[in-house]
Image (cartoon, rainbow, N blue to C red):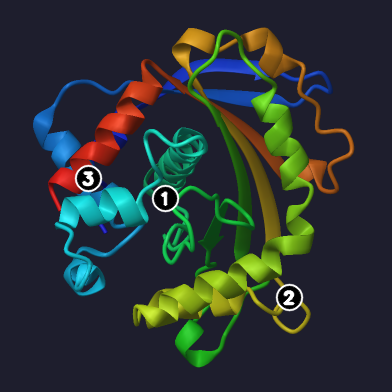
Amino acid sequence: MPSPPHISWFVDSGMELETADGSTVKIIEFQHREDARVLHEWAKHFREHYCLDKEIDELREGTGLTRGQYLLTRIFPSKTSRLGPGIRSGDFAEILVADYLEFLQKWTVPRTRYRLKSSPDESTKGTDILGFKLAPRTNLAKGVYSPNDVLLCVEVKAQFSGRSARPKLQDAINDSAKDQYRTSLSLNAMRQRLLLVQDRDAAQVVRRFQNATDRPYLSQSAAAAFFCDSIFDAQIVSTASTEGHPEPDTLFLLVFKGKDMMKLVHRLYEMAADAA
């Protein structure tokens, strides 16, 4: 799959911070700008995280709603409800971090997390992002699995509004510590959703990581925080600590930041609905 054009807006700042326990935090900037073509292509890519374009008409049948109305009222988190904006920013950050990992870091990252939500204004339970890397000798069709295959579990926290930064990176680290207990459930949910849309190749990749006892593999974790530039605070980020995390040696830390992020969030949801 070719990289969506908005991927070029990720820029390595060259800046790294050190946490309270000496861990390194990589800082990545998201330098978005006004570009109608890029935003249009991004809106389609973004929309299909929630609902495949080929399914919208069948799903909205009988509702009396246009495609855009259906997406805004039944599928996307609300712009105006009490919980909706927070869910929007959280989903948005997770999707962007998944894009970074897939298209720039070359992980395989199936996108199923936001489909089949019972309520648009609720966050999906489980690990935020699951990524996979298969070693060259692995052959899924023949049932050949390398112990060097890697499962990546990522927790993401976002803050796009407010007067001061909150310890979002620490929150992501704390949630990452829970992934060893919920990863199997998240893998199962991902595979179920992939099978529902007949994506059997991706489902087979997930299946490879569902039995570590018989098919051992390597595990890696990441914690990421995404801030609006207006509230990013390097000192708050540096107070984070990985002490107490069950696998600190395999945990890597990322911070993303960009300007006017909440404005961008709402704009992209509107574009995704209008262009459906």
Sequence-wise first label, 1 or 2: 1
Name the residue carrying label 1. 102
Q: CA distance from mark 3 to mark 1?
A: 21 Å
At 81% from the left edge and 47% from the top edge, which residue is drawn?
247
Q: Which SS class for mark 3?
A: helix
Q: Give whichever of 137, 173 is nearer the camera.
A: 173
Label 1: which secondary element: helix
**Alpha carbon separation for disc pair 3 and 2:** 39 Å
Q: Which residue is mark 2?
A: 212
Residue 243: image x %, image y %?
87, 33
Quadrant in which residue 124 is drawn: bottom right
Vertical order, 142 against 8 (above or below): below
Name which residue type carries label 1: Glu
Name the side, left or right, on which 42 lies relative to 207.
left
Tags 1 and 2 touching, CB below 8 Å = no
Which element is circle 2 on? Answer: loop
Q: CA distance from mark 1 to mark 2?
A: 23 Å
